[in-house]
Image: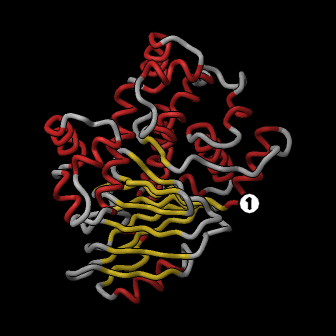
Amino acid sequence: MDVEPLSGHRLFRTNDAEEARVRMGRILRDHRLDPGPGTMDARCDFIGFGDIGLAYLGYGVQVRIRSEPTESFRIVQIPLAGRVRVRAGAMDIASDTTVASVPDPDAPLDMNAHDRSRHLLVRIDRDALDTHLRRVLGRSPDRPLRMSPAMQLRSPAVRSWLETLRMLHLDAAGPGLLRDSRLRPQFEQLIMSQLLLAQPNSCSELLLGGSVANATPRPIRRAEQLIADQARDMPSVADIAAAVGISVRSLQEGFRRYLDTTPTERLREARLVGVHAELAAADPTTTTIAAIAADWGFWHLGRFSALYRKRWGVSPSTTLRS
């Protein structure tokens, strides 16, 4: 997502880690900020839009951020450059410009950001989103809203949501028409509706079940979720097709039509993300690249290394040693 800083909405710019921590704590929550080596150049531009806020954020050095559960709001952390590893409860996401993270608001948050990372944080009031969900469904859901922790930024539905965020970003830098009290509620509802429809969640079946034209069919959504949840253990596209009860050809056609990718590409991507996360956390004195790669289904080390370098911009050994 190509987003420029909002200099007209500067919250702070500082090389003091404590000041950055305190100022960011005013729009997120109090947290611990541990910078890596180098000179910090922390900056944050922020626009509040009713129950929604956008923060453009960068620190200029590697940082680790830890906080208690956000509880009252949800965040979507979208890398604009670099990479971030995000942990929240059982969730562990290696996030970059193709994969955003959607942490569980009820779990402690632990984020490690690369020194060249820049992020767009989308903050949405939790009660407002739950209220909007009830309005869309016409009733209270049978279970609390839980969202898939990994957001695939290249999926068509997510790209549509990002374009809406871009509209808000551009308007904030220009005429500010969307801040009009007559327009703001409609725009807030659009952002929340698109998020609920684009990001797999515990109510997706109710939201998409026959009520939305051109919605992704249930078997394709199940297959996508299977890949996200079981990329390490799902041996082939044929196994995925069998698990959701359709043919391999139907699975392939469904992924091309509704997700603008193929099952093989999505499975490879999920495995590369998994390998990257394990290498980043591994002890280089006791871990081999070959063992982790093989554990994720990459048996040809040379081919794996080429795919890894193309995906992450560095060699597997560089990640293991970092």
**Does residue 236 appear to the left or right of 320 in the view shown?**
right
Which amino acid type is marked by label 1? Asp
Q: Which residue is mark 1?
A: 127
**Does residue 130 appear to the left or right of 84 in the view shown?**
right
Taking the spot 71% from the left edge, 40% from the top edge, the residue there is 203
Taking the spot 47% from the left edge, 61% from the top edge, the residue there is 121
Question: Tag 1's secondary structure?
Answer: helix
Examine the rendered structure and indicate whether residue 111 appears above or below residue 131: below
- Image x and y of residue 20, in percent: 40, 82
**Does residue 125 appear to the left or right of 160 in the view shown?**
right
Q: Where is residue 236, by image quadrant?
A: top left
Q: Nearer the viewer, residue 75 or 298?
A: 298
Tell me which colouring the rendered structure shows: secondary structure
Examine the rendered structure and indicate whether residue 76 appears above or below residue 205: below
Taking the spot 35% from the left edge, 55% from the top edge, the residue there is 277
Q: Nearer the viewer, residue 100 or 221?
A: 221
Locate the C terminus and report the quarter of the image it occupies.
bottom left
- Image x and y of residue 39, in percent: 21, 82
On the question of residue 1 being in view, the answer is no
Q: Where is residue 48, by image quadrant?
A: bottom right
Q: Nearer the viewer, residue 98 or 270?
A: 270
**Which residue appears farthest toward the right when viewing the image?**
139
Taking the spot 30% from the left edge, 60% from the top edge, the residue there is 280
Examine the rendered structure and indicate whether residue 41 appears above or below residue 132: below
- Image x and y of residue 290, in percent: 22, 46
- Image x and y of residue 263, in percent: 41, 25
- Sort mark 1 into few (<14), some (14-19) or many (20+) by Cα contacts within 10 Å: some
**Does residue 52 appear to the left or right of 158 in the view shown?**
right
